[in-house]
Structures are given as structure tokens and as C-alpha cells.
């Protein structure tokens, strides 16, 4: 079976193999906390066995719902924020034709995202796009009261009901929410929306392998059973407390680097389809580890594009960084650099070669240069951008995140800092129940 692999050899100058091995007992203890539910935040470990415990009937129901939306809609708007949209966006972008949005022959509905911002222009322009077109909504929220998606859903629901009437609109709305509680659950029950459940023990940033991610991915036309198969393979591959476990190897190495003064991790890709995978990864690690005055700062870049903007800083800036490189072995298509008789651009020396060969040499040359410049590199190799391998990669990062968080000494599964901005925003907007906070914050401005 082909699988994703992790290579730490180019981090050895700062995190030698012996140092990483010395952290194995600590990493094994962290893995046990994740697997056995004995650590802080153990009420949010439902993601650990999602690939193997999700019933086939539920996957079939998700696929059937996706097919119904595909048949009825030109657009499907996925409403959510944070983990409620980033995982699906990452997978869809990784698997999509880069120019599908511009193709007149685009098959099936176009999946659009909303509720991930409070951009008035964004919502105005989305409303203009949808008016007069057949569209559906997937609304994702445990509570139904999170500000950003709640605003977007209210606006989109009004448009859909005006165009289709309440009954027909209800047939094009799918709610992914709590099983029993919350405003969205109440509304879905009253209006008769098709629903899927977000388990109480699955946090948003770990939810891509639940209906939260699976339904939008299926609507976009991709094979969620293959995605789950890959995740199940990685679930098995990350079960043992050894350095052959890629999640332990990655988590232990990044903690060794952190303890050696490398405080910033840059996730690097050489395939533009992985841009949003970097965005998903940033939330996963930033929200899980950044607390109690600790945590590796997660950043992401797209190479070789960002070599012409961030490359100087990475090569010669403050030496507090390390890189984790996502390397895709095989592209989906072949493009050859042509010969040009005039050769004014001087490129005939690579004529006849595949563009991917040039890209791979850019990757190798950059890794060597950055290591020489004092930037340790980890390399994660992905066989191809297919559902199976993306499922493996998602699960690898999730499992490693839990292990790494416990090694840092934090609860990887809460996010107390996220609530601070919300309290201030509610006070500034004079939300009922926040009268004292409103008075206090207005005295400060």
C-alpha cells in the first residue's frame, strides 16, 4: 500500500535523531492520552476513530443528499466558519481543476463558501450572483448563533425563500448541527430541513472527516469513501508508540525544534492546489497549541510563488523558524517545456523536460539552500493529490496535533482565547445580556 511518509533528515542539525528518540517516551505518553482519553480535553476526542466508526449507511446518506443538491442546484453555498469550512475548502481546492470556476462546461453545482467573514461587499456580491439562479445551502453550526455564519445564513435563507417559497427552499437547505440543542437544531426541526449531526465530542477544527466536511466535498463531486479509506489507513498507521508512527515522528521532531528555539513553523507547498490545505493546517495547529503562553506559530507559504516575496526573509531572517514541506510525487497531468529556435529566454536547456521536473528541482534546491541558511526542514511526501492520500494527510496532521499539544503541556482541544474578541464585539454591538460589558468597553474608547 502506498502511503504518506515523513522525513526528518534535513532537521538533524538542530534536532538530531538521538534527540528525537529521547522524546519518544514523552510522545508515547501523549499518544496514549489521545487514544485512551486520559488527558485534558478528553471530551473532544471523537475524531480519533471517525474513519473506522462512521457507518457505511451514513456515508451513503451523505452521498445521496449530495446527489440531490447536485441535481437541483447551480450553486451550493456552504455556510460556516473556522473548521466548519476550512477542511472542505482545502480538500475541494486540492482536487479541483484550477480553472473550473471559469469553465462554461463546469459539471454539477459550484460550491461557494459564506459565513467565514463579515464582509458586507462579499455578501452583497454573493447575493447578486445567486439571485435568479437555483441554489442550495449547507449551513454548519452546533449552536446556530455564531455571528458570522448566522448573518450569512439569515441573508441567504431570505433570498432562497423569496425565490422558491418556504417549502421549496426548505428542500434545498441542509443543516449540520447538534443532535438535540441549539437555535439551528430548533429551526431545522420546525422547517423540516434535512440534517446531519455534529457529534458533541468532535471539535470544529477536527471535523473535516464528519458530515461537516464530507457533505460539501461530496457535493463538489469527490469520492468521500476513498477519503475515509485513506484516513482509516492512517488511523491504523498512527496507532503504535514508535518512531515508525509518522504522527509521533512529526510531533516529536517539531517539539525538539521548538525546544531548540525554533518558534515558527512554515508549512510549504510546491503545488498551488494546496494553498487552502495550509489555511486548514494553520487553524488546526494555531488553535490547538497557542495557549498558556506557549505554542509554535503556524505560517504557510506557496512556493515557488512566495520565494519571490518571502524567500529573502526565510533564507536570511531571524533564525527562529523551521519548515515542513509538502511534496507531491506525481501531478495529474503532463506538460512539456517546448523548444524555441530563438531561445531569447534562455530556456532551451530544459526544453523537452516536464514542468514538474523543474518544480522538483526548485523544491530540492530551495530545501538545500534553506538548510544551509539555518532553517531545518521536515518533508512530508504525498503520492498524489487524490482523495485517499488527502484522507491520510488530514488524519496524520490531526493525530500529530493531539500528540504535539500534550507534549507542549497544553490542552489541544479547547480554545479559550477565541472567546475574548466575541465578548468585546457583543459588548460593542450592545447585545442583550451584555449591558455591563457594553458600559465598560465604551468607557475605554
Image (cartoon, rainbow, N blue to C red):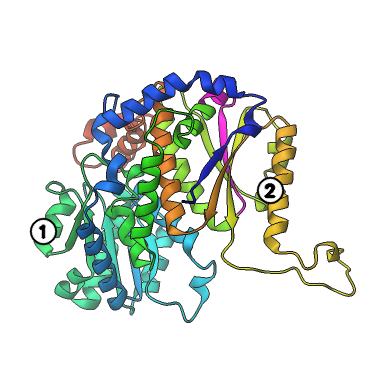
* Magenta stretch encompasses residue 68: no
Of labels 1 and 2, the one closer to you: 2
* Quarter occupied by residue 345: bottom right
x%, y% of residue 318? 68, 28
The quarter of the rendered structure image containing the C terminus is top left
x%, y% of residue 250? 50, 33
10 Å neighbourhood of mark 1: few (<14), some, or many (≥20)? Answer: some
Describe residue 301's horizontal placement relative to residue 360 as left or right: left
The residue lying at 42 percent from left, 77 percent from top is 107
261 above or below 193?
Answer: above
Q: Is residue 174 visible?
A: yes
Which residue is tagged 1? Answer: 189
Give the Cα separation between the discs numbered 1 and 2: 52 Å
| Boundaries of the magenta span | 255-270
The residue lying at 36 percent from left, 42 percent from top is 235
Describe residue 203's horizontal placement relative to residue 349 as left or right: left
SS at badge 2: helix
The residue lying at 59 percent from left, 26 percent from top is 262
* Quarter occupied by residue 154: bottom left
The residue lying at 45 percent from left, 31 percent from top is 248
Which residue is tagged 2? Answer: 363
Amino acid at each position: 500500500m502506498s502511503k504518506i511518509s515523513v522525513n526528518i533528515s534535513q532537521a538533524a542539525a538542530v534536532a538530531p535523531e538521538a534527540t528525537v528518540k529521547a522524546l519518544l517516551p514523552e510522545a508515547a505518553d501523549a499518544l496514549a492520552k489521545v487514544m485512551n482519553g486520559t488527558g485534558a480535553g478528553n471530551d473532544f476526542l471523537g475524531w480519533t476513530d471517525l474513519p473506522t466508526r462512521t457507518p457505511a449507511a451514513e456515508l451513503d446518506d451523505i452521498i445521496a443528499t449530495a446527489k440531490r443538491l447536485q441535481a437541483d442546484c447551480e450553486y451550493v453555498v456552504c455556510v460556516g466558519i473556522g473548521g466548519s469550512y476550512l477542511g472542505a475548502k482545502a480538500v475541494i481546492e486540492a482536487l479541483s481543476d484550477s480553472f473550473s470556476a471559469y469553465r462554461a462546461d463546469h459539471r454539477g453545482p459550484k460550491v461557494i463558501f459564506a459565513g467565514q467573514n463579515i464582509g458586507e461587499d462579499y455578501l452583497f456580491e454573493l447575493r447578486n450572483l445567486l439571485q435568479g439562479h437555483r441554489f442550495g445551502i449547507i449551513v454548519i453550526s452546533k449552536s446556530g448563533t455564531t455571528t458570522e455564519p448566522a448573518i450569512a445564513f439569515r441573508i441567504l435563507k431570505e433570498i432562497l425563500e423569496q425565490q422558491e417559497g418556504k417549502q421549496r427552499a426548505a428542500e434545498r437547505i441542509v443543516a449540520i448541527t447538534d443532535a438535540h440543542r441549539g437555535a439551528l437544531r430548533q429551526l431545522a426541526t420546525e422547517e423540516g430541513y434535512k440534517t446531519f449531526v455534529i457529534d458533541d465530542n468532535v471539535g470544529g477544527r477536527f471535523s473535516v472527516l464528519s458530515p461537516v466536511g464530507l457533505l460539501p466535498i461530496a457535493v463538489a463531486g469527490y469520492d468521500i469513501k476513498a477519503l475515509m479509506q485513506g484516513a482509516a489507513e492512517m488511523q491504523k498507521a498512527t496507532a503504535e508508540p514508535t518512531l515508525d508512527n509518522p504522527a509521533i515522528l512529526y510531533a516529536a521532531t517539531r517539539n525538539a525544534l521548538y525546544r531548540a528555539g525554533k518558534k515558527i513553523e512554515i508549512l510549504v507547498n510546491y503545488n498551488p492546489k494546496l494553498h487552502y490545505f495550509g489555511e486548514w493546517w494553520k487553524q488546526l495547529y494555531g488553535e490547538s497549541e497557542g495557549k498558556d503562553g506557549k505554542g509554535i506559530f503556524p505560517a504557510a507559504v506557496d512556493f515557488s510563488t512566495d520565494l519571490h516575496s518571502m524567500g529573502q526573509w526565510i533564507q536570511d531572517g531571524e533564525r527562529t523558524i523551521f519548515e515542513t514541506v509538502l511534496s507531491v510525487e506525481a501531478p495529474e497531468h503532463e506538460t512539456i517545456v517546448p523548444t524555441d529556435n530563438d531561445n531569447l529566454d534562455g530556456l532551451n536547456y530544459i526544453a523537452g523536460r516536464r514542468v514538474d521536473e523543474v518544480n522538483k528541482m526548485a523544491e530540492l534546491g530551495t530545501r538545500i539552500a534553506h538548510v544551509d541558511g539555518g532553517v531545518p526542514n521536515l518533508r512530508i511526501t504525498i503520492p498524489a493529490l487524490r482523495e485517499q492520500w488527502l484522507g491520510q494527510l488530514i488524519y496524520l496532521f490531526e493525530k500529530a496535533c493531539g500528540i504535539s499539544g500534550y507534549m507542549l503541556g497544553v490542552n489541544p482541544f479547547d480554545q479559550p482565547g477565541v472567546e475574548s474578541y466575541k465578548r468585546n464585539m457583543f459588548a460593542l454591538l450592545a447585545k442583550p445580556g451584555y449591558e455591563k460589558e457594553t458600559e465598560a468597553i465604551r468607557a475605554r474608547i
